[in-house]
Amino acid sequence: MKIPFQNSYVHLGKEFYVKTLPTPVARPELIHFNTAFATALGLDVSTFDPAKATAIFSGNTLPKGAEPLAMAYAGSQFGGFNPQLGDGRAVLLGEIITPNGIRYDLQLKGAGATAFSRNGDGRSALGPVIREYLISEAMAQLGVPTTRALAMVTTGEEVARMQLVAGGILTRLSTSLVRVGTFQYFAARGDEVSIKRLADYVIQRNYPEVQSADNPYYALLVAVINRQAALIAKWMQLGFIHGVMNTDNSSIAGETIDYGPCAFMDTFNEDQVYSSIDHAHRYAYNNQAAIGQWNLIRFAETLLPLLAKGDDQYAAQQAVNLAQDALTAYNTQYHQYWLTGMRAKLGLVLEKAQDQDLIEALLKTMMENKVDFTLSFYYLSQLTKKPSTADQSMRLLFNDAKAFDRWVTQWRTRLSAETLSDTDRQKKMNAVNPVYIPRNHQVEAAIRAAEDHNDFSVFEQLNEVLKTPFVLQQGKDHYRLPPKPEEIVHQTFCGT
Ligand code: AMP
Ligand code: MG
């Protein structure tokens, strides 16, 4: 299986990266290979050779055409700026262009120390590799822009975390690994030449449509803001909490990137946090849209020198005005994406003024009644215009059944304005309200089996179910239902 690399990042200049080879590992084993995604990438899977694949995806053999490097970037972490982070445990092997012309970065995460490792070992434990594989691939199937996972290996080496644990390497792909932090890296150094080069690169690669705009850099800012607004609205509609939305984990291409302590909520709670280190709830569920904007302000700041022509005060003011306009529009865009998505979740095709109140009333009563987020919307998708026995499943989720009755009556009144039949509406709702999400306790079970018993079957079964998250699968209720009290995962960890 040949990987036809075509590398462009390496030509940006040596300010952008440090050439770095993956560090070989002792006894790599290929745990999982994503054949479907490999095929979509245009790789010839019929010539797949497990031994060669193991060597490549562990970093032990360098595939032909790869030009490995660690990318430089900075980042605002929990609000505090760090001028130099960079790929401390990831090596970009090169880029692949799919048959549809999409360029992907291919990176080994956990491939050994780099110039940016600081005090870290450059390695990854197997647990976080499994987590990222399961959740990023589930996100892709749920229709959320995300980095993808191609392969997973164990290294045959242990890494020291809270205790010694098995090491792993994830092969992940992204339509661009450039982050807000990459721009900040050059801004912090006053390197406007590199900022322009980076912006031109991003435009050419990820936003070719802005090339012809009067002011392409302003158009880029607007487009990046738009994709980020769309992304975060999707997270909100699925109950996803990223957990570490630092600017270095904020993708310029608008993908979900750097799956650390992320999690899908079970019980709905607006203020939900899972990350063990997010004490101030900076990255809580309901803060994500605002934090997204905070990150985008950091991005806009780095673009200021490009936004208006000239060195005088007038140009500087004009740049600030343009940035402010774009950033203000974020709120409207985000709200529109959120509202459109929520209407779809409620089965509303027409746009009525009272819809927002109806949606907010549902979320409020869901929170008061501590209901399961995913299951509520799944059961809602099965309801009919007239009350029926189907009501019972959703009703039973609510501590106060009367609260459900009150809301569902309002919903039915609103539905009477709609023209779709029950069947047609249910079909639409079932296409946006998943049956299965990677529930924390299931992800945890897959990790425990792998780490404690070298058993990857739990991972395989869960991964299989998550390939079709909108389709009810026979005998898979286990994956559909919320955790039992003793199974609830209360905290998640970066695992770095
Ligand atoms: P993350 O939490 O994955 O977003 O990582 C934040 C920063 O820490 C990035 O610059 C990473 O490359 C770096 N980092 C995380 N874990 C390690 C590790 N085990 N060794 C070296 N650097 C790391
Ligand atoms: Mg990161």
Image (tube, rainbow, N blue to C red):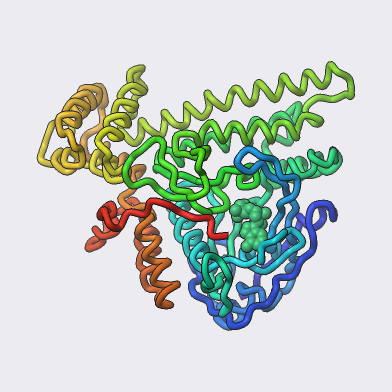
Q: Is residue 428 above or below residue 491?
A: above
Q: Residue at x 15, y 34 (%)?
A: 401
Q: How many marks?
A: 0
Up-down relation of residue 331 to residue 432 (above or below):
above
Report if residue 96 is visible in the image: no
* Residue 482, percent from left and from top: 28, 52
Residue 132 at x, y percent in the picture? 50, 59
| Residue 66 picture location, percent across and down | 73, 68
Q: Nearer the viewer, residue 82 or 145?
A: 82
Q: Quadrant of the C terminus?
A: bottom right
- Front residue of 79 and 376: 79
463 up-or-down from 189: above or below: below
Question: Is residue 471 left or right of 171 when viewed as pictured?
Answer: left
Specify the quadrant of the image occupied by residue 429.
Answer: top left
Q: Is residue 244 above or below residue 1?
A: above
The answer to whether any part of residue 182 appears in the image is: yes
The residue located at (73%, 31%) in the rendering is 301
Residue positioned 44% across, 31% down in the render: 338
Q: Quadrant of residue 339?
A: top left
Task: Indicate left or right for 250 with 368 as reference.
Answer: right
Q: Residue at x 70, y 47 (%)?
A: 205
For this view, does 153 lie left or right of residue 207? left
